[in-house]
Amino acid sequence: MLKRSDLAGKAQTVFGLIDPESLGITLPHEHLLMDLTKGCFIEPDTASERALAHQPVRMENLYWLHTHWINNVDNMQFLDLELAIKEAHLFKRAGGDTIVEVSNIGLSRDPQGLVSISRATGLNIIMGAGYYVGSSYPPDIAEKSEKEIAQSIVREITVGVDNTGIRAGIIGEIGCSKPLEADEKKVLRACAIAQQQTGAPLSIHPSPDDELVHEIVKILQEAEADMTHTVICHCDIFGLAPDTLDTIADAGCFLEYDNFGQPAGVIFVFQDRLIETPSDVQRINAIIGLIDKGYLDQILISSDHCYKQLFVTYGGYGYAHVVREVAPWMKLKGMSDEQIHTIMVENPKRFLTFTAI
Ligand SMILES: [Zn+2]
């Protein structure tokens, strides 16, 4: 069992503690092996769409998946180790070094699988701890106290997940529904306790709602989480108001623009909110706006692979997109090499380094 002093100043991959200097170019929010269907798959209403919902992902139904990514079971399941290795390897070949795999309890996390991917590709892989959204919680969570949940998260970081001996290097992605469920509030407070005991980074998946994000920040602050090692994910797709982004930044948290390469220009209603998915150019413009406000050191970027359609195998950009296209596009838009390096290397390194007391 590791102590906090063992973790301090290090990052933790599925192979153990490493010097954060070797993290290099990092994708801080991805999935390699997981099942997103539990609590997230939405069965369509009509007969013909139900047929599409249960087809394997293929060229003939990609047109439909580009606007219905959460309505197809196969699209939401990453169960193929060889496919994961092949896709992750493209990131390595493009110059990438580290993937943070934020699948945790509720997302069919696969510690042994992640070790295999790391060994096959040579990538550093950092595994997630804790719980995804309330709808995917195991049944016993309601009876557990805040302290008991915190203890289980601490164990995943200091001892290992289940009996694998493979340790998590980040708490998250911690799911938050709209409205926030009582047990989700309990889990958030438990994360703060686990963070105090380990110095681990914390990754929060909110839902698209400004008030909810304010509520999450307040709960974490009151529970004395280390806000400077906390990231609020998906800031690019939820259409958050500028003052909400300011609240996140003022609290000291990282702002994550993690949907690079995902379908742009799609409009839909999700959890009573009109979502308009931005293009990568809009994301870059938004990031430049954040830099102008002085938030350069708090920006993280990634491509949150959680649908098969995003894989190169299925016509997507794949894990290499951020390195291969986004970084040059940032330069074209006038960002300096130093700013890009800060966002792709320095910020994730600072975020993923366990803190001392
Ligand atoms: Zn998420």
Image (cartoon, rainbow, N blue to C red):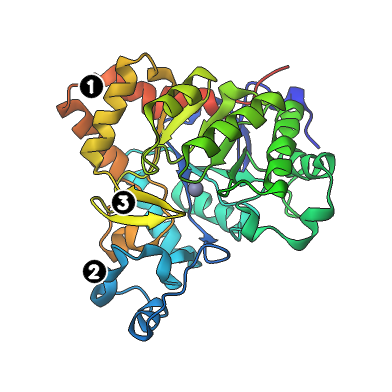
Residue 339 in view, yes or no: yes
Q: Neighbour class for label 2 at 10 Å: few (<14), some, many (≥20)?
A: few
Q: Neighbour class for label 1 at 10 Å: few (<14), some, many (≥20)?
A: some
Local secondary structure at mark 3? loop
**Looking at the image, which residue is at 53% across and 60% down?**
34
Residue 159 in view, yes or no: no
Single out the mark in the foreground, 1 or 3: 3
Location of residue 60 in the rendering, given as x and y in whole percent from the top left corner: 24, 77
**Looking at the image, which residue is at 63% across and 60% down?**
136
Q: Earlier in the sequence, mark 1 or mark 3?
A: 3
Quadrant position of the C terminus in the picture: top right
Report whether the residue tagged 2 is closer than 8 Å to ligand 1.
Answer: no
Residue pointed to by mark 2: 63
Q: Nearer the viewer, residue 251 or 319?
A: 251
Q: Are marks 3 and 2 in contact (CB under 8 Å)?
A: no
Local secondary structure at mark 2? helix
Which kind of residue does numbered mark 3 sit on?
Gln
Q: Residue furthest left?
A: 332
Q: Nearer the viewer, residue 200 or 148?
A: 148
Residue pointed to by mark 3: 262
Residue pointed to by mark 1: 335
Q: Is residue 315 left or right of residue 251?
A: left
Q: Neighbour class for label 3 at 10 Å: few (<14), some, many (≥20)?
A: many
Query: Looking at the rendering, which quadrant does residue 226 occupy?
Result: top right
In whole angstroms, how far apart are the C-alphas of marks 1 and 2?
A: 34 Å
**Looking at the image, which residue is at 29% across and 29% down?**
286
Single out the mark in the foreground, 1 or 2: 2
**Looking at the image, which residue is at 30% across and 63% down?**
67
